[in-house]
Amino acid sequence: MNRDWTATARTLSEALPYMQRYSGAVVVVKFGGNAMGDDEAMAEFARDIVLMKQVGIHPVVCHGGGPMINEMLDKLGIESRFVRGKRVTTKETVEVVEMVLSGLVNKRIVQAINDAGGRAVGISGKDDDLIVCEADDPELGFVGRPVEMNVQIIRDLYNAGLIPVIAPVATGMADNETFNVNGDTAAGEIAGALRADRLLLLTDVAGVKDSNGEVLTQIHPDQVREMIEDGTIAGGMIPKTETALKALRDGVRAVVILDGRVPNASLLELFTEHGAGSLIRASKPRVRPRGLRQGESEL
């Protein structure tokens, strides 16, 4: 037992430089995937978010909820239809999407964070016109593409000691329409508007893989574009990496695509030397100051 306590103390001591490095930083976390449907995984995620806040980070949570939306549509007898892998969102469907994301899913995450000792507040992209959209593709119906971001409400919340939890439902440019926004897209736009230090995209894969199937721990945007062109990055990883590239262009310091199924994945990324998943950053590493993953640079 004493050995366990000693190991815990050593781990905390080794994490100190990283805690100092991120104190006061804004970290946007996209939460989704299978972990959302598992009570134990949800509670673990919530503890990680509360710990971030406790050590001085400003975590901002943006979530998805596709499986829960599908389940509710099935219960209501509403057919789900997809075009090029994207959900066709009718007027009827978008009402269900808003109900599930802003209600069921959002409040479940808020409650988990509060149960872990945090102070979370659930909002959606419609609150204070946080996310204003126009139709992404007429064929998809009420699927939105963000064209205006108003993130002061997020700053007000985290500066007041609260943890914002954001459902990706947005306001339309005209006629008070409601739009469904892809969770990764919403998280990327929020991170860019906040000029966040980190955007963590939690998913159900280990990270971006090379042609041999090995996870790449650090990638430059030029490499990402080359891998998309040659087909190494394919399928659902394309929109995630494209979200990462746009977030970097908008001022996010670095984006990490990591496996949310791994226990304490976010803490491993932020508070250990080697991190977790695939880190994408615009600047190429030169030197490694204290508190950064091996090979990462402040520049």
Image (cartoon, rainbow, N blue to C red):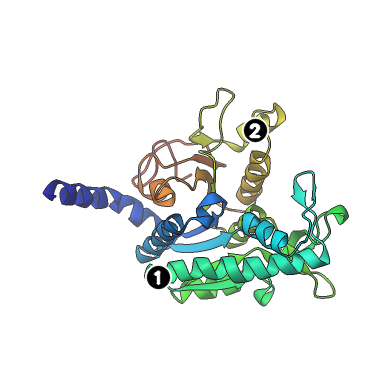
Front-most of 4 and 211?
4
Q: In the image, residue 18 lies at what x, y percent?
A: 35, 51
The one nearer the camera, 9 or 191, is: 9
3D distance between C-alphas at marks 2 and 1: 38 Å
The numbered dot on residue 233 is 2
Q: Say which label, 2 or 1, has the lower sequence index.
A: 1
Image mark for residue 264: none
Residue type beneath disc 1: Asp
Residue at 55% x, 41% y is 280
Q: Mark 1 sits on what residue?
A: 115
Q: 206 or 70, which lies in front?
A: 70
**Residue 275 on image: x %, y %:** 41, 42
Q: Is residue 232 left or right of residue 4?
A: right
Amino acid at pointer 2? Ile
Report whether residue 51 is seen. Answer: yes
Secondary structure state at the residue bearing disc 2: loop
Residue 147: give x, y in percent of width and height.
Answer: 75, 61
How packed mark 2 is, by other alpha carbons closer than 10 Å (few <14, some 14-19, many 20 or more), is: many
In the rendered image, residue 184, in percent from the top left (x then y), is placed at 63, 53
| Residue 32 sits in quarter | bottom right
Quarter holding residue 192: bottom right
Q: Is residue 23 visible?
A: no
Q: Is residue 96 left or right of residue 202?
A: right
